[in-house]
Image (tube, coloured by chain):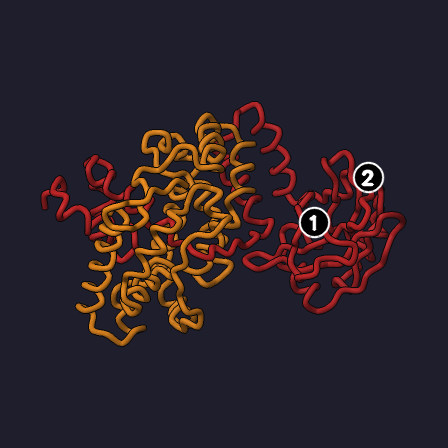
Amino acid sequence: MNYENPDLLTPLAADYVLGTLRGPARRRFERVLTRVPAALAATLRWEDDLAGLNGALEPVQPSARVWRGIESRLALTARAPARSAPRRAWQFALAAGLVTVALIAGLLVRERQLAVQPVAALGADAAHPVWQVERRKEYVSLRIRVVGAVERRAGRSYELWALPKGGAPVSLGLLPEEGAVDRPLSEVQRTALLVSDKIAVSIEPAQGSPTGSPTGPVILVASVSARG
Amino acid sequence: MSTTDDAATGRLSVPSAPTATEPGSAELEALLARCASRDAAALEALYALVAPILLGVLLKMLRRRDLAEDALQDVFVKVWQQAGQFDRIRGRPLAWLISIARYRAIDLQRSQRPMLALTALHLELEPSLQVAGTAADAMGLGLGGALARCLDEIAAPQRRCLALAYEQGLSHGEIARAVGEPLGTVKSWVRRSLLSLRRCIES
């Protein structure tokens, strides 16, 4: 067809933008877009016109794993080499299954590992953990210890989340601001933790998230150590 | 958003070209420009601003949170890779971002159809096609009154077809099944509604 003819192009571009142009025809039009400026212009006009239809546009807060995924996918190709080298080394260390908490703290002795195993160290960087999260064998409970300086915020709490692969975050309860807690895990929490590569901390109201999902900013994300 | 009274028709009309002064648009454009020069902090700031909006769009189309979040990830990877092209085309930044998200959802629907079919066609959420509200307006999306008025001019059944296509990403065939009309009718309804929407916006 003659893609310069606006009478043909306008409805075709509309079909494309609306999404009702499907299959091979859609692929074909995408190729046309790369070489026919009039087709691109017609498409952009429809995009602008129809974007206003996104009506109520109820924003939904993505779970923390989405941004982490973007970061790790782009790190491979997009980061400056100066930054990517140490990062890759760090990722390699995780991929190799090194137990991060044991490395960072250098505290755990073999006997204790039988009973209590590290889950993650939470802190701004590996050298300065604020909380250490360990688990009793079989995930009966979590032991969470404050090992760094917790910045206290009036009326706010820090909530711990499991980030199960392909699912919504599951609360693991509020983090202590001092000392240590031993927290039994429910079946839901245990299952979530078993399929989580990461756990995260968000800032929530004093009583914790009112919705069951993180509502405040996610301030920390940490990888879950290899399961023993 | 500036509107002018059209004395001849007594209707409100809006400039068809996006205005550069829309609040929020400039901020998004600046962030996209920084993304184009490989500033990762700009991508993170952009994400904080628009990811929840895009996830809202994606959820309506894909219905499943895991799929929608995977798609959201793809969208931002693409935005990072194509941010340099935004300057060239000069649409509204949020419209461009929403389009990338919608196209990703449409492509994913193709491969996920068998899985989605069980849930996607329940249509328990009546599509509404509401004109962008304050949050989107702030980012330079809204056509405001003109679009609302133009939508009102489209008859309800036709508008519903448009909504099923735009908001939920249904194909002509799926819309036909959902509204119980022949495929040919649905195709011509959709096409005619779009063209009358365009004529109305331009008037």
> Disc 1 or 2, which lies upstream in sequence?
2
Q: Quadrant of the C terminus of chain A?
A: bottom right
Q: Residue furthest left?
A: A1
Residue plotted at (44% across, 32% down): B29
Q: Which chain is orange?
A: B
Of B66 and A40, which appears nearest the observer?
A: A40
Residue plotted at (32% across, 73% down): B178
Residue plotted at (38% across, 45% down): B100
Residue A84 image offset from top left, x and y in percent: 56, 29
Q: What residue type is disc 2 on?
A: Gly
Per the image, label 2 sits on a secondary structure element best described as loop
* Category of crowding for the residue at label 2, using alpha-carbon neighbours closer than 10 angstroms: few (below 14), some (14–19), many (at least 20): few
Q: Residue furthest bottom?
A: B180
In space, the residues marked 1 and 2 are separated at their CA atoms by: 27 Å
**Label 2 is found on which chain of the structure?**
A
Residue A180 image offset from top left, x and y in percent: 87, 52
Q: Are the numbered discs 1 and 2 placed on the same chain, yes or no?
A: yes
Per the image, label 1 sits on a secondary structure element best described as strand
Which residue is denoted by mark 1 in the rendering?
A202
Q: How many marks?
A: 2
Q: What residue type is disc 1 on?
A: Ser
Residue B154 image offset from top left, x and y in percent: 27, 62
Q: Residue furthest front?
A: B7
Which color is chain A depicted in?
A: red
Q: Is residue A132 left or right of residue A193?
A: right
Q: Is residue A185 left or right of residue B37?
A: right
In terms of image quadrants, where is residue B188? bottom left
In terms of image quadrants, where is residue A182? bottom right
Of A142 and A7, which appears nearest the observer?
A: A7
Instruction: Answer whether labels 1 and 2 touch (C-beta < 8 Å).
Output: no
Which residue is denoted by mark 2 in the rendering?
A106
